[in-house]
Amino acid sequence: MAGEGSIYKIKSGRRKGTWTAEIDLGKTAEGKRKRKFFYGKTKREVKEKLQAYKELMGEGIKQEEAKELTFGDWLTSWLELYKAPRLRTSTLESYEMNCRLHILPALGHIPLLDLDTDHIQALYNQLSKNGMAPATIHKIHQIIHSCLDKAVEKRLLRWNVSKATEKPPVKTNNKGKAMSEEEMKRFLEVLSTQSPKWQAAFLTLLGTGIRLGELLALEWPDIDMEERVIHIRRTLSKTKNGLEVNPPKTKTSEADVPVPSVVLTALRAHRKAQLEVILKQGEKYKDGKKNKLVFCTDVGTYMSPRNFQRKYYTLRDRAGISNEVNLHGLRHTFATRLLEEGENLKTVQELLRHADIKTTANIYSHVTPKTKQKAAHKMDNLLNKKSTS
């Protein structure tokens, strides 16, 4: 009967004197009998091997299929079958780069069934020793962990060995610090000398907290001047094949963002100036007329995120702002100013469109001196009221 096993001692041949456990695996499609053998020096040894194999069979683990795969085989297959059709191009390129440069050279040759926590931990330790940023190591872990999770789900493995690894701690606020109030004031002064397009662009980032990719994918129908909201419907990203427009990564990213009056005024001025450019360019103005792009090149095509960053760095340097305040720091500045003015964390989370309030709390866990002073002032008022009552 398939699944049953027998144990016996070999009496002749090159394995004479050794013990064997044999298990019947049924028949092939051609009707031939399938058997698997386990060899050992003692009856106990082969019995344990047989029992372990039968336990995995009982759990539905596809041992014969998994035995033919290296981890590299499975990783490549997983990436092609399960991730490539669902990932945006820029994200897929990042996955492929990390696999090619780091994961496959270190782990690709190891048989899938032999891959152990120690193998993966050794990779993380070496990458950390080589100076790789903890956040990048976490991205590599995410690839390995997801890949092995799918192998467990497909019954190729019993459990995900990456779960027991230790990753280096990640500094939560590693995407650029916020401008101070004085730096923000200087930045706005420099910005006031720029064209309506650049004023509107940077005021939109500072006044709404939207991301650069979302800004550069904006179309005029996305902006409701009457309701004073921006509808986030798509995002622009750079890939090795050029610029690509996709829907936002998550449902929380796809939302309506309120717009301050100052930003609306700047957007109206920019639209007026943009219409003048369109008339001047005539036939040269192409995609912008069709796509109604808000922030684009002077011929109406999508603006490169890199070129936008260069413009920001020029303005930042003119304003004498720290190099630690990168372009993403404008989003941090938006959130930090709101928190300093007493806005509650939940509202800031919703404006930033973080899926989890823990993310917002971790990034803005530092309490600025101004916020501390406000809290002390509030307590001062409460204590004075009580002492005079």
Image (cartoon, rainbow, N blue to C red):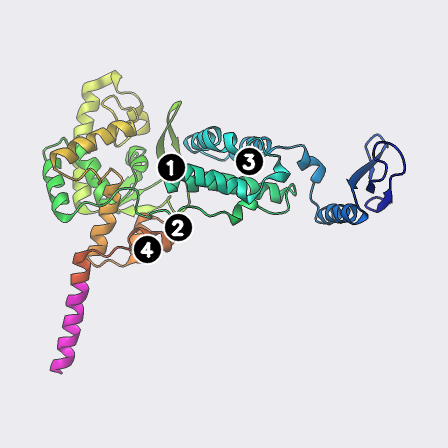
Mark sitting earlier along the chain (1/2): 1
Look at discs 4 and 2 and give the one toward the viewer.
4
Sort mark 2 into few (<14), some (14-19) or many (20+) by Cα contacts within 10 Å: some
Query: Which quadrant of the figure has residue 253?
Result: top left
The answer to which of 379 and 220 lies nearer the viewer is 379
Which image quarter: residue 113? top right
Tell me: residue 80, above or below residue 181. Answer: above
Please check the rendered image and state whether residue 384 is part of the magenta-colored stretch, yes or no: yes
Which label sits in the foreground, 3 or 4?
A: 4
Q: Main secondary structure of the magenta part?
A: helix
Within-10-Å neighbours for mark 4: few <14, some 14–19, many 20+? some
Q: Which residue is mark 4?
A: 361
Q: Are marks 4 and 1 in contact (CB under 8 Å)?
A: no
Q: Nearer the viewer, residue 47 or 26?
A: 47
Q: Is residue 268 above or below residue 310?
A: below
Quick one: which residue is furthest to the right in this view?
A: 11
Residue type pointed to by label 1: Met
In the picture of the structure, the residue carrying the numbered disc 2 is 355
Q: Label 1 belongs to which residue?
A: 132
| Earlier-in-chain disc, 3 versus 1 | 3
Q: Position of residue 304 (x, y in %)?
A: 29, 27
What residue does disc 3 label?
Answer: 82
